[in-house]
Amino acid sequence: MKLTRSDFTKRYEAGTLKLAFIGMSNIGKSYTALRLATHYKFNLIEVDKIIWENLGHDSMDAFAKWQGHPYSDDYAKRERHSIKLETEATRKAIRTLKKNPIIDTTGSVIYTDESVLKELSDNYYVVYIQAMEDHIERLKVQYFKHPKPLVWAGHYQKLKGLTEEESILACYPNLLSARAKAYASLADVTLASTTILNPEIGIVDIYEKLKPAH
């Protein structure tokens, strides 16, 4: 949703500013959305939470364990089902009526149904947190250390001479590159992960960086 700087401020003051954060899992979407919700009293809507609650799970870890890794048995079937769940949950989040909502999307929101992506881009100001080189290695480590369900969309393959886990780490940059293009095409504004995760940059400064230039 294209906004001018003036529109952005007016909508916030009226309680009708709708923000959506997109980007890879563990890149700072939830962290930033929560900081904004706390400081500026946005209403936070977490799509991951809607999904795992619909599955009857009580945590993100349980959801990640259910989906598994791309080399797990029946992963492809669960991946398709996960995308369907994400589509339904994202649609529900978009249509939730709250004052100044922030949607914390899944990292794989770009694989949801095209009608949902259109509804998101038509009605929400979409903020893309771009994974910069400094943080790519951290993302790979976090994938195993703090697992979240991850849609690979065909970007994983077992590589000769590597274990399954080593193959994941080797394929991860290709997944990241493919997703980056899709995220950027959906975004109204892009913020670098080095900005979002810089402890010296306060939430007031980040909020200002969200606003359109003009």
Image: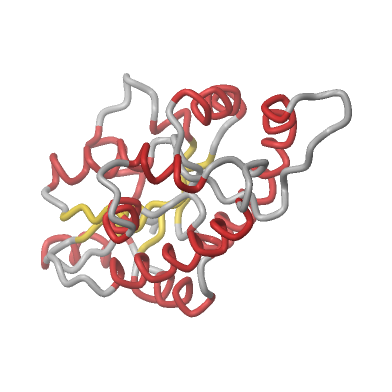
26, above or below 75, in the image: above
Residues 42 and 12: in front is: 42
161, above or below 187, in the image: above
Q: Position of residue 97 (x, y in %)?
A: 16, 72
Q: Residue furthest right?
A: 160
Q: Viewed as shown, does residue 157 lie left or right of 4?
A: right
Residues 186 and 206: in front is: 186
Residue 4 image-quadrant placement? bottom left
Q: Position of residue 40 (x, y in %)?
A: 14, 46
Q: Position of residue 157 (x, y in %)?
A: 78, 42
Q: What residue is drawn where x is 32% and y is 26%?
A: 201
Q: What residue is drawn where x is 36% and y is 63%?
A: 125
Q: What residue is drawn where x is 34% and y is 74%?
A: 123
Q: Residue furthest front?
A: 73
85, above or below 183, in the image: below
Q: Residue furthest top?
A: 200
Q: What residue is drawn where x is 24% and y is 56%?
A: 45
Quarter containing the C terminus? bottom left
Quarter containing the N terminus? bottom left
Q: Viewed as shown, does residue 58 lie left or right of 23?
A: left
Residue 60 image-quadrant placement? top left
40, above or below 92, in the image: above
Q: Viewed as shown, does residue 165 lie left or right of 6?
A: right
